């Protein structure tokens, strides 16, 4: 899978894309991630990529031409399954969208910055608009890092059996059960007896009960359907 990301501030994504599971996936060539600096497509020697909004108002808007040139340049090499714009007015990102995106071959993420991007890019190129929640970030970069992380861990071969994504919260519309590790007794805080019993079936049942209990208490909306 290839994930290309267009950004005006590529440094914002450096750390999340170069550590832990995402780095391991890149090392194993299970994913290729390219961050493209929009400034490489700036219109003049001052590196201009944004301008004030027509009609007035505060903030800057990423201009249509640098984005157009950047996207069409990338499209010379590959066809994208989805061109995604990260924006607070997009569809709320969730695990089923992560599952769907992890099955694509090539995706392109566009990060807005400041006030967003010229609407004409959204009309003519963007095929999916995603928000990571009802709050406004300074730009789409942190949202893109979140989307990439959640997709990459689902690509077959990225996680080993012990880390399997199948047990994640949301994967079966339930929150994950509580987890414990050694020691079994820390200052009198004890791990539930059942987890020490070695009784696989009973442990499975206990985990399912805990998942249901947690979901009912914390996210009853998830049980509605
Ligand atoms: N850009 C700014 N805020 C955002 C959000 N909540 N989700 C995705 N992209 C954004």
Image (cartoon, rainbow, N blue to C red):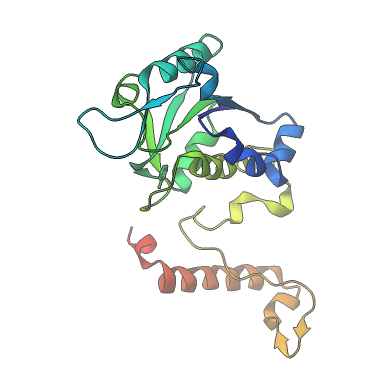
Location of residue 21 in the rendering, given as x and y in whole percent from the top left corner:
70, 44
In which quarter of the view is residue 37 placed?
top right
Residue 110 to residue 147: above or below:
above
27 and 37: which one is in front? 37
110 and 24: which one is in front? 110
114 and 209: which one is in front? 114
173 and 185: which one is in front? 185
Furthest residue in direction bottom, as rendered: 188
Location of residue 172 in the rendering, given as x and y in whole percent from the top left corner:
49, 54
Side of 9 relative to 221 (left or right): right
Whether residue 1 appears in this view of the structure is no
Furthest residue in direction front, as rendered: 46
Side of 180 relative to 99 (left or right): right
Quarter of the picture holding the C terminus = bottom left
Residue 123 to residue 92: above or below:
above
Q: Please give the name of the residue rendered at 73% of the width and 29% of the height, measured from the top-left corner.
A: 29
Location of residue 48 in the rendering, given as x and y in whole percent from the top left corner:
45, 22
Furthest residue in direction top, as rendered: 76
Q: Please give the name of the residue rendered at 51% of the width and 24% of the height, measured from the top-left corner.
A: 38
In which quarter of the view is residue 186 placed?
bottom right
Q: Please give the name of the residue rendered at 70% of the width and 87% of the height, measured from the top-left corner.
A: 189
Ligand 1 sits in quadrant: top left
How many labels sit on residues?
0
Q: Please give the name of the residue rendered at 54% of the width and 34% of the height, measured from the top-left corner.
A: 9
Residue 35 to residue 22: above or below:
above
């Amino acid at each position: 899978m290839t994930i290309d990301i267009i950004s005006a501030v590529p440094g914002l994504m450096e750390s999340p894309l170069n550590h832990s599971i995402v780095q391991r996936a890149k090392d194993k060539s299970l994913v290729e991630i390219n961050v493209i600096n929009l400034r490489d497509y700036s219109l003049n020697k001052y590196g201009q990529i944004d301008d004030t909004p027509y009609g007035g108002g505060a903030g800057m808007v990423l201009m249509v031409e640098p984005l157009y040139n950047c996207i069409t340049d990338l499209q010379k090499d590959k066809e994208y399954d989805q061109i995604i714009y990260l924006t607070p007015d997009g569809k709320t990102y969730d695990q089923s969208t992560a599952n769907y995106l992890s099955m694509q071959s090539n995706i392109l993420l566009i990060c807005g910055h400041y006030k967003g991007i010229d609407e004409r890019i959204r009309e003519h190129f963007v095929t999916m608009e995603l928000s990571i929640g009802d709050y406004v970030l300074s730009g789409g970069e942190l949202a893109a890092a979140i989307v990439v992380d959640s997709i990459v861990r689902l690509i077959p071969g990225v996680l080993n059996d012990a880390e399997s994504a199948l047990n994640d919260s949301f994967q079966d519309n339930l929150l994950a059960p509580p987890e414990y590790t050694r020691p079994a007794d820390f200052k009198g805080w004890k791990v539930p007896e059942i987890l020490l019993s070695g009784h696989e079936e009973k442990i499975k049942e206990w985990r399912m009960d805990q998942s249901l209990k947690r979901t009912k208490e914390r996210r009853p909306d998830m049980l509605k359907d």
